[in-house]
Amino acid sequence: MEFAELIKTPRVDGVVLHRPFMPTVEGTLCLTGHHLILSSRQDNTEELWLLHANIDSIEKRFVGSLGTIIVKCKDLRVIQLDIPGMEECLNIASSIEALSTLDSVSLMYPFFYRPLFEVIEDGWQLFVPEEAFKDLESMVLFYPWNETTLFGLPKEDEEDNIALWSAESAFTVDEAVMMRAAQPLTGTNGRRCKEDEKLINATLCAGKRGYIIDTRTIAVAQQAKTRGGGFEQEANYPQWRRIHKAIERSNVLQDSLIKLVEACNDQSHSMDRWLSKLEASNWQSKVKEILTTACLAAQCIDREGASVLVHGTEGTDSTLQVTSLAQIILDPACRTIRGFEVLIEREWLQAGHPFQQRCAQSAYSNGKPRSEAPVFLLFLDCVWQILRQFPCSFQFNENLLIMFFEHAYASQFGTFLGNCVAERVKLQLSQKTVSLWSWVNRPQELERFLNPLYEPNNLVIWPSVAPQSLLLWEGVFLRWNRSTKCLDEACQEMVHIIEYNKELQNKVNSLRRQLAQLETEDSPLQTP
Amino acid sequence: EGHIQTLRLDCVEYVKLLNKYAEKKSALGTLYLTATHLIYVEQTNNARTETWVLHHHIVSVEKLPLTASGCPLLIRCKTFQLLHLLFQRERDCQDVYQSLLRLSQPVKEEELYAFLYNPHQNEEDRRQGWEFISVANDFSRMGLSNDYWEISHLNKNYEICSTYPSILGLPKNASVAVVTGSAKFRSRGRLPVLSYYHKDTKAAICRCSQPLSGLTSRCVEDEQMLQAISQANPNCPFIYVVDTRPKLNAMANRAAGKGYENEDNYSNIRFQFQGIENIHVMRNSLQKLLEVCSMKSSMSDYLTGLENSGWLRHIKSVMDAGMFLAKAVCEERASVLVHCSDGWDRTAQVCSLACILLDPYYRTIKGLMVLIEKEWISFGHKFSHRCGHLDTDPKEVSPVFTQFLECVWQLSEQFPCVFEFNEHYLIEIHNQVYACQYGNFIGNCQKERLDMRLHEKTFSLWPHLLKNQHLYRNPLYRRSLESTVLRPSTLPLHFKFWCGMYNHYDRGMHPKQSVLDQLLSLTQKQEEGERTMTELQRLAVADGVLPDPSGPINTPTEQDSPSEKTPTAPFVQSNGSCLPLVNGDAEEAGPGAEKCIDKEGAEPGATEHDLTSSEDKPVSVETEHSKEEVQESS
């Protein structure tokens, strides 16, 4: 298919762009196969380059012959384009609609994008799974993207998704592991599977205990039995104790995000209405639930030295939130930029979180959600909450999290395309697209994501999950609704103080050295 | 030590101070009651923890039903601290309960701490301390007297208005007859006078109480008074008259012979209601907020509780009114006259907030002192009544001043670089207002304070705060930004719950690492580094390593306050007058504040972040809970 067929009007002059907290720009609007571009064609004026893939929905309005298109983006930004001429406006609108809802993955921008930077380190070769598990000594390696048969796992078991993660030896706990899986297929008649029992029980040494954290309530887990799913019967897994938590299924999340963003964008309401809408969105409750569960998993490992198996239904959503957050709490390596990338690669991409399905639409989507759900965004929100409570323990800052959010929803890079490793291999992403990591890990880019307050901290960091401690993530949800001038100034000032201090200490030290040197040179003369 | 005999030292052993979330962890300790403080001492191994609570800070003492583990006593403080004590013997509990009831509710002013407290200053220091902040100086700073406004001594004997200060800013062209006539037409004689003069626009903020207009009354002098205020501003032909009350409340007052200005009777006024609720609504709102804060609730209950308390709605209404004033002055160059009913609660909030929005001086450490002295203390905000210093009418108590401090905090969240002070400063002022350790906030108006001879018998808080100002500095403060008028967003979503105030003592809820403390310690390191640098450079020049005495390296920000040069101890002890508790060297900590010798409390400005605490007492409040769940589920 040619993109040109979808572009009814490739350019319109005299278009006015309105963005909150920015001056309006008048210029020429151009549509390309992947971008909406507005350029004033004047020097020093910022141009707008918007990926069609970033567009969540559009609205049209007409006043006389002046048409207005409201473009609502997946990164939650809302912009307005005033387009002279009704026909042009209609053409532009329908072109955008068509281009932003392309079905075929291979038409997505990453397949067309050619980097303007030199790829020094190919992100596709960066994270080799063996590396990630290298700290595990006595464990057998499982390759999560391989087929079930390689595990010797029974066919009726959904546990095709097991990954192991070891508590590093840095922790004073005995070797405890965290595992994730999907639900066992016990069904209503309580089927058993010897191999599964053997596998699960084999991870525990004699006399050791383990916890199975089922992210669903017992009622939901019971219900799953009628659809062939279920949970582990304790009699069959004697060393394990099962705990149920109440993380809701991902399909409820989409609704929660829509409500939250709607509340954040409505400038007209009173304090009471705002708070009640914030409450009704349920987003903050979900943040709390997930963090609580992650703390629980971390606690089992850190406090009890017990192994943990986490699962919900599929093991690709809430399970990943819990296991990855628990690692951030426990493992200082996950709080570095590289370590966090490894975490996303291992616990999300390779673990088969269906990014393409989950991130197909965002908060402004009008359509009925199919499999869309901001599971990953909610995870990033939880990371932000921990980061806010431990502002000195992360090598990265909030910008990195926001960047991941943006790229998960729309990107020039292939990293978040596809729904699992198998799909990505089939799409030949590593040959045909550029990896996000190739770009992020360039020193010029990394600078933006560095936390000036970072001081490596090897301890376990326990976040507070009291409601008072969990704030609305303004950096994402109020990002386009506030002026960041004052906050940016504060950031600059902070960097300034820290850098000046470093510089000063260096100068003091070097002067001190010089003087000391002088003294040692002088001293033989002084001693008689 | 003469006064030690007057202290009755009660001491109860085997008391537990319950941690809200982990009862098991509490060790046994000893409770002491002194004349001024409740002190709880817990000794475990080598660590000694002391919790000090000033009796004046105690707002209620409640005996809870007996449990298997003992007799619980719940102590609530005006600083929002909650103490949950557990006694082994019922009689001990009863004794302490009785003593605290008596100690926490003094009947006469002379029983207040300030009359007993002596920071070892001589009379000259004391006098200077009281003169340190002067409202008269602030009038000069604003440019008074000038062509339009003058400083008047008409009220020097408090005859025109007993609750006003002795010096008043009045329009030059208002005659004595107009001034006295207008005073008679205003509730409690609180006539329209100058609160703030904005040099650049020549617009003024004036304040007063409601007119005694009833349904039909009018007063020529009062009308002339407003006319005079209007004429004192050559830049605008009208003045705004802002009634900060909800319209309904104001109308109800008309029936009682009070009310609001009739636009038909006053020339060139634009009348405006603002809808800030009265002290009773605010008191109940805080009550509800505190219930939410102390409960261990779900996110949903918390947000619903926050909404139902109405607290943030009220904060927003004060902020909105303050914004209205500031905008009128700086954008329309219009003068504003503000009142509520008596003009000492809402009016004080709104005028002082507008001052902060308009004038960067009030965003400095000293400037805030001046502002509080001017708009609150001198204009007769009834601190004694509103804070419940004495055992008087509980219906007079209201968190009006707390709300003002919160508005300032909300602003500092939106503008992190424009305030010279940090959150600790606001919280310390709040604690001091209720502590009655210094005389500033005792009494309801200037005349009362004069009659009590507070300046002779007590000390002023301000020099004490200034001495400790290194604790209260905002490291991000940038003087270059100071000249701007603040235009905060007052959208509901920009107001936050102030955890640092209302859950101040729930340390587990706060970020475990504080950016502020980190930056404060960096600034301290920077000062030390600069000193060392100067010294080393001196040596280097002497030794010939450096060719040229170029002086210290340039400092990035010109932080020039002299007091910063003093090396800073992380926690400054304020006085030694209270009896030494143990070892003879336990000085009293920041007044009324708790003094912990445990590792958390002892070094608030310490460089090390608080990670030790996350190591040995992990939690996250609720993860502790989830651990119990682990055990329960087994």
Image (cartoon, rainbow, N blue to C red):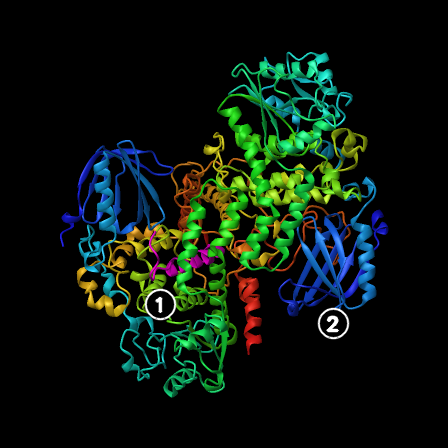
Amino acid found under the numbered disc labelled 1 = Glu
Which of A196/B173 is in front? A196
Q: Quadrant of the N terminus of chain A?
A: bottom left
Q: Could you classify mark 1 by the number of other residues whose Cα lies within 10 Å: few (under 14), some (14-19), or many (20 or more)?
A: many
Q: In the displayed structure, would residue B21 be above or below residue B256?
A: below
What is the x, y in percent for residue B28? 71, 67
Amino acid found under the numbered disc labelled 2 = Ala
**Chain under callout 1:** A
Q: Quadrant of residue A375?
A: bottom left
Q: Which mark is residue A347?
A: 1
Q: In the displayed structure, would residue A430 be above or below residue A149?
A: above
Res A352 seen here: yes
Q: Which mark is residue B68?
A: 2
Q: In the displayed structure, would residue A389 be above or below residue A301?
A: above
Q: Which mark is residue A166?
A: none
Which of B49/B427 is in front? B427
